[in-house]
Image (tube, grey):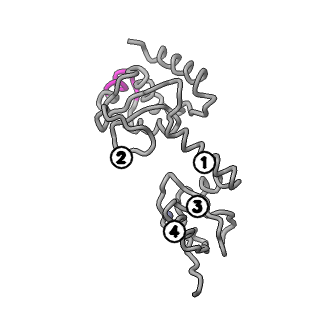
């Protein structure tokens, strides 16, 4: 069984060789790093929450049981939890289990999401920084903090400086379908302007 130092140098090597260029984030928090080292140690086998707890305790360190967040840093892990939208679901895993699939390829779900975001940014420059800035608000219309936020440009009036309103897909489709423009107040609430008949 490799020790932590050995695993760390393996992990660093994989990251430098394959994942850094894909913008996968190397964990900076110790908890997250321990979780990744544990997944690497078990690779390619699945790891339950209890196994991870025990592994980290034995090696010395803390576990917050949030290893799933590694997927959104770009690490290619799979889960048995069918409710996830941020990584692939592997039906051979139990709900609380995670497994590292590859240390050469990034999480394909995360990668696809980034590609879509990038294409939106090319079409609507400034959109990405705008959704980052208003992350807590989510969709300006319904407030959902869906991971899929779209730029909506048909703004008739806004109290804040804004080129596109971040809307979820449902709200955006609804406005487009009815040809509604929106007005935005100072609390980042967007309301549709219903044209007079
Ligand atoms: Zn919405």
Residue picked out by circle 1:
117
Q: Are marks 3 and 1 in contact (CB under 8 Å)?
A: no
Q: CA distance from mark 3 to mark 2?
A: 24 Å
- In the image, residue 70 sits, relative to residue 131, either above or below, namely above
* First reached walking from the N terminus: tag 4 or tag 2: 2
Q: Say left or right for 161 vs 103.
A: right
Give residue 139's mark: none
> Helix or strand or loop: what does disc 3 sit on?
strand
Say which residue appears at 51% left-offset and 21% top-offset. Answer: 11
Q: Main secondary structure of the magenta part?
A: helix
- In the image, residue 158 sits, relative to residue 42, either above or below, namely below
Residue picked out by circle 2:
83
Residue picked out by circle 4:
174
> Can the viewer see residue 69?
yes
Which of 143/4 is in front? Answer: 143
* First reached walking from the N terminus: tag 3 or tag 2: 2
Q: CA distance from mark 3 to mark 1?
A: 12 Å
> Helix or strand or loop: what does disc 4 sit on?
helix
* First reached walking from the N terminus: tag 3 or tag 1: 1
Q: Nearer the viewer, mark 4 or mark 1?
A: 4
Which of 133/149 is in front? Answer: 149
Residue picked out by circle 3:
166
Say which residue appears at 31% left-offset and 26% top-offset. Answer: 54
């Amino acid at each position: 069984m490799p020790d932590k130092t050995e695993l760390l140098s393996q992990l660093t090597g994989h990251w430098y060789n394959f994942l850094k260029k894909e913008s996968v984030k190397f964990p900076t928090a110790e908890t997250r790093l321990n979780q990744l080292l544990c997944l690497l140690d078990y690779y390619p086998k699945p790891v339950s929450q209890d196994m991870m707890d025990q592994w980290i305790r034995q090696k010395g360190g803390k576990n917050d049981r949030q290893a799933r967040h590694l997927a959104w840093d770009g690490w290619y892990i799979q889960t048995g939890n069918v409710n996830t939208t941020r990584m692939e679901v592997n039906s051979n895993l139990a709900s609380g289990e995670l497994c590292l699939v590859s240390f050469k390829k990034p999480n394909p779900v995360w990668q696809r999401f980034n590609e879509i975001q990038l294409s939106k940014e090319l079409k609507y420059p400034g959109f990405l920084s705008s959704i980052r800035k208003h992350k807590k608000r989510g969709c300006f219309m319904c407030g959902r903090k869906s991971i899929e936020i779209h730029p909506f440009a048909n703004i008739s009036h806004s109290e804040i400086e804004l080129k596109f309103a971040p809307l979820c897909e449902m709200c955006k489709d609804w406005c487009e379908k009815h040809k509604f423009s929106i007005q935005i107040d100072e609390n980042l609430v967007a309301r549709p302007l219903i044209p007079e008949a």
